[in-house]
Every structure is written in C-alpha cells, then in structure tokens.
Image (cartoon, helix red, strand yellow):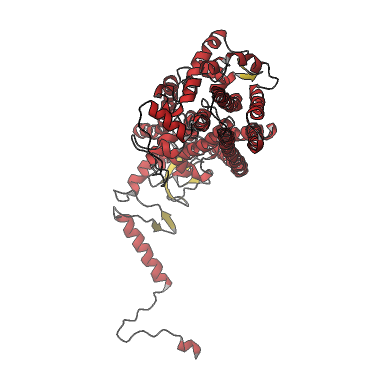
Amino acid sequence: SSEASRAVVPAPNSPVVGAAPPTMRRVAMQALAVLALVAAPATATQGIGFGGLSLPPPVPGRGLNLTAEAEICEKIEHCYCIKRTQCGWCEDTGKAMLGTHKGPLADGQTCEKWVADAPKCPILYCPGTDTEEFWWWMHCSWLPAACLVLYLVAAVHKKIVHSYTDPSAEVNAVMRAVQFESGHASFSGNVSEEVAALGPTLAESQAADFFSTRRTFEAFRKNMLCPASERLPTGVSRPYEQHLADMSMMPGEKYDKTRIAPHRLSATISIALQERSALGATMVSVTGLMLVCALFVMFLRNAARSMGKKEWQWVALFSREVSAVTTPLQTALGMLLSFYALNRIAWFWSILMEGHALQGRLHDIGMIAGAIKQDTEKDWRARYALYRHLTLIHFFSYQPYTPRLRFQGFQPLVNCGLLEPDEVDILASAHLGPGTVMEAWVSTWIEVNLDGEIRQQAYNSLRELRASITRLQTTIAQRAPVSFESLLFVVVYAMVAMLPFCLTPSIHAGDREAVMDGPHVATVIGTGILAAFYLALVHLLRHVQAPFDHIGAPNDALNAIALFNSTERKMRDYLSMPTDKELAERMRKQNEPLPEAAS
C-alpha cells in the first residue's frame, strides 16, 4: 500500500531505537531535573524545569542552592533588588520570594501580583547599594557636563573673537543704522553724538581700499608713466565674492582656477565653524540646545528609575506626542525652507551678475569715449571729467546698500579727488539722489563731446547703464511677503526649540530599564546637528538679504569696493591711454626704453 511505501526503513547496520513510552519519558525528565537541583554547574545559562515550572537561570559564578537563595530573598526589602537573584516580588505582601515566572516556588504560596523580572518593578531603584548609586549618577551626568563645557567654550570663544576682530563695534553699529537721504549719509536718531562725531574718520578707514588714493588730473594725464604712489590700488583686502577654495588654501599657496580646487575636510570644518560664517555664528545656540537635550535625557533616565509605572507612562506619552507633532512638521518645513533657500541663493547670484553687467556698461561708455581726440588740454580735461562722473555713478549705485559706504558723506569723495568742491551743493540738492545728477551730466557730456554714429552708440550704452542700475537696485529690494517670512522663521524657531524633547527614543512602559541605563549620546548629537542646520540656514537667509553687509555676514558678503577698483582701473586705461605714436614720443623724451610689443 501507499502507507507501507512511505514507511521509514532503517539501515541494515544501524541500531533500531524505539520511541520511549510517554510515562518513561516523563520519569526521565523529572530525574534530570532533580539531578540538576542537587549539583547545578556554575556555567549553566538555561532555566531549570521542575514539576511543570521553570526557574530562571542561576547566577553566573555559583551553583544553584535553594536554601541560600531563599535566605537572600528574605533579606530583600525592595522590588528592584531582586535583580540578579532567583527571587521574585509579590506586590500583595511586599516581600521577595524564591520563585519562577509563574509564581512562588514554595508549596502553598500564591501571589496575584507577582513580579518575576526586575525591569517590571514599579520603581527601578534598589536602596542600600551606595557604590552602584554613585557610578550610576556619574554615568547619568557626564553627558550634560560635557555639553555644558561645550556651551561655555562656544560662548567664551564668541566673546573673545568679537572683542579681537571687531574693535570698532560701536562704529559698526552706527554704520548699519545709517540712512541715505537727499544725497547725504545721515545717522538715525538713536545714535549718540559722540559716536557720530568719530564715525566718518573710522568709517573712511573701513573703505580705505577706495579712498586711500588721491586722484588728480596730472596723474590721469600720465597714466602708464605715473609713479606707483599715484597709481590706483591694484588689490583689495578681500575679493568681490569670497570662495571656499580661496579660504581653504594653505599659507603661501595660490588657487589655480584652471583646475578643481583641492578639498580639505579639516580646512572646510575650520572655515564653517568661524564666527564669520553662518554655522559658526549659531554655535552658542546649538550647544545650548544640546545642553537642554542632555538635561532632558538625564531627567528621563532618572524618571525611568524612580517614578512609578503610572507617572512613567505620562512621561512616555509626552515624549511620543512631541515626536508625533514634530515629525510631519519637519517634512513640511524642509520643503518650504528648501524652496525659499534656493530662491534666495538664486537671488544672490543675480545680484552678483547684475554687478558685473553694470561694470560692463561703464566699460562700454569708457571704451567709446576713448576714441575722441586728445590733442589739447581741453580734450584731456573732458576725458578726466567723464572718468570722474562714471566712477561716481558706480559709487552712488551701491552706496545705499553698503554699510561701509552708506556712512560716507561727500567730503571723502572730495578728499580723494573724485568730486569737485563746487559740485557738492548741486548733488546735495537732488530730489532722488546724486546718482541721477551724475547720469544727467554724462548725457550732457556725450552730447557736447561726441557726434555722429559714435554719439548714438554712447547713448545706447548710457541707456543700458541706467537699466543695469535700475535692475540692480530693484533686485536688491526684492523681498518675500512679510507674512510668509515671519511665519517661516517663527515655525523654524518653534521647531528648533522642540528638538531637544522630540528626538528622545519612542519609549513605552517596557523600555524603562533601557532608558535608565543607556547614555543616549546619539540623541544629543542628532539634536545638535539638526539645530545647527536649521539655525545656520535661517541665519544665512536673514543676512543674505543685505548682500553687501560685511558686518552681519563677513564671509558671504559681496565686496563692492573690489568691483569699484577693477572698473576704475579699466576705465582709466580706456580714457587716458595715449596712441602708440604719442606714447613712444613721450617715453623718448624721458629717456626711457620702449616697452616690448605685445605678441
């Protein structure tokens, strides 16, 4: 039959072992259990079965002695003290008894509220173990102590850096409060008269790269032949736009723009943590939030240890509720911040490009006007006047938006030779600003000094120059709606304030011992990383709206003075460079060798 064909046939040489009857198997099991009770090995790791019950594994290092274990249980006065023993806890009687997971082991003893495992005790605390108590508190408090040290270091470092790198803090505050009105740089009403009196001298030193050179007609006429002391500055303290590759170069190393810049992680981290960068500017707040998170973790660990089950459930519920609120909020906020940040970075780059476009329009006019004759003193005077007017148009286009220039009046421009004393009153009486007057003067200059097709080309370039100035100023003035921006920032700050309480593990009633004994370092570090990201991004978005503010965001601000100097040098070459024949003649008169011809 089919059943016979499926029968298992033993091998010819193998012994046939029949299945033991159930009664014999039960007797053998009980005999093994009794043997184990008599002499349990010291390395046993499994429970011992007896009479349908299961004892917990014996304590490593000694055999199982029921009499000794019973004496230990009699001395236990608190539930959590049954840990690492063979005892259980009866909440009905408030006593420890030798037992298993099902109840007391002794005959006739019963308990309705039986606690077999120490983690299930109402309070996870065993008084009387002073040594363990000391080390537990040391283990619990080292993380808040480390975060406190980080916070103090960040706060002291910020104080030291500010006092060292920003000695004129009061003047910088004044510079940021300056308002441009009717062609004059004036102070706001809340600035003291003493600081206002000292302001112009110190503020002029802030823009020394531009005001340090005295422009004169004689130096303009000499151009290539003028001495180094009369030349325009060829360098500035920082470029128009500062790059990470330039800042991460080693001392004496130059950045080759024709190849990919080397990436040094240590240099990048050092730059990011500078007070001049967005991330470094938020380090005090970030370390403060890490300290709050570490203290909350310390509270959770102590609550898991000393609170009752009901109180602990309330704490666990609070942690889960905060996590449930912030998780979807982080998703929505991440989308909004990403959209807004990308828009603002694109806006910043558009300002960067509009600055170069404005520079190109100025160069166009200078190149076209450089073609006029230069035979008489009057011709050279006309060229010098156009050179001054174009440079001042460039200056006045950026002055309302640059703190180090917005502080300036007309006197520094007179001192450096760009403005004549009799022109000051005319510019000061302008309805909109001095830049409009300068544009009108350039238009008149083109009408008087140029003719024919070259005049038409110059007018076209002047119209494009005016359009570039308008685009630059309207682009800088672009802002998000007040309601959107305020809502976004308030929600970001609210979520960051909740971060120390929402990144704790999702705890339940059964997680108490894990919460009590775990250090939760990753929770504190994660809070710091997320807080640093959100706060640094908000800091950048706030300060990038003033793209030329070298005080609020030194590493990210554009340096308009670098653009002024490069534009002025090129315009000076266009308007004052003599012809090849005239240059050769002038050099021969000075007994100087002719320069080598360009290849």
Q: Residue at image x 41%, y 41%?
A: 598
Position of residue 385 relative to residue 503, above or below, is above
- 287 and 396: which one is in front? 396
- Tell me residue 585's x, y (percent): 42, 30
* Quarter of the rendering occupied by the C terminus: top left
Q: Residue at x 49, y 24 (%)?
A: 220
Q: Quadrant of residue 254?
A: top left
Question: Does residue 576 appear in the picture of this structure?
Answer: yes
Residue 347: name its quadrant.
top right
Q: Nearer the viewer, residue 373 or 479?
A: 373
Residue 111 location, x and y as percent?
50, 46
Q: Residue at x 49, y 87 (%)?
A: 3
As drawn, the residue found furthest toward the bottom would be 1
Number of labels in the image equals 0
Regarding residue 126, the answer to whether it shows in the image is no
Residue 100: x percent and y percent? 43, 51
Q: Nearer the viewer, residue 277 or 438?
A: 438
The percent coordinates of residue 570 (x first, y second) are: 50, 33
In the depicted structure, whether residue 333 falls above or below residue 283: below
